[in-house]
Image (cartoon, helix red, strand yellow):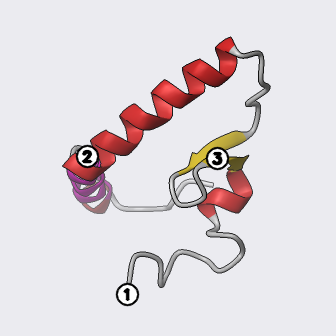
Amino acid sequence: MAQKLSRRAASAKKKRDLAFAKTAARKRKKAENQRLRRAAKKAGKSLRGKDYDHKRKRFVSVKSNRGNEGKGTKREGRK
């Protein structure tokens, strides 16, 4: 479900999201994901409803990956 944001807030979020997507780390992860997806498809694997998890180094369900294995993403990335 999309967030209900004002035009100004939506514009600011769009800029933040794009800046984050263009960081070096995100570009590397996206490129790695594309390489692995293409290879898996070529090998005949079904990737429907799956994302590549860069921590676990394998394809997992979207729910599991984006929800950080049920722990949420609030503390993700902190040491």
Q: CA distance from mark 3 to mark 1?
A: 23 Å
- Element class at badge 2: helix
Instruction: Using the image, determine if residue 69 lies above or below residue 45.
Output: below
Say whether disc 3 or disc 2 marks the residue closer to the N-terminus: 2
Q: Does residue 50 show up magenta in the picture?
A: no
Q: Residue 27, percent across and down?
A: 29, 40
Camera-nearest label, 3 or 2: 3
- Element class at badge 1: loop
Camera-nearest label, 2 or 1: 1
Instruction: Using the image, determine if residue 50 lies above or below residue 55.
Output: above
Q: Which residue is mark 1?
A: 79
Question: The C terminus appears in which quarter of the rendering?
Answer: bottom left
Q: Amino acid at mark 2?
A: Leu
- Left or right of 35 on screen, residue 53: right
Q: Residue furthest top?
A: 42
Tell me if mark 1 has few (under 14), some (14-19) or many (20+) residues whose alpha carbon lies within 10 angstroms of its own.
few
Please report the bounds of the magenta region as a residue range: 10-21
Q: Amino acid at mark 1?
A: Lys
The main secondary structure of the magenta stretch is helix
Q: Which residue is mark 3?
A: 58
- Which residue is rendered at x = 72% and y = 75% of the image? 70
67, 42: nearer the viewer: 42
- Which residue is rendered at x = 54% and y = 30% of the image? 36
Q: CA distance from mark 3 to mark 2?
A: 26 Å
Say whether disc 2 or disc 1 marks the residue closer to the N-terminus: 2
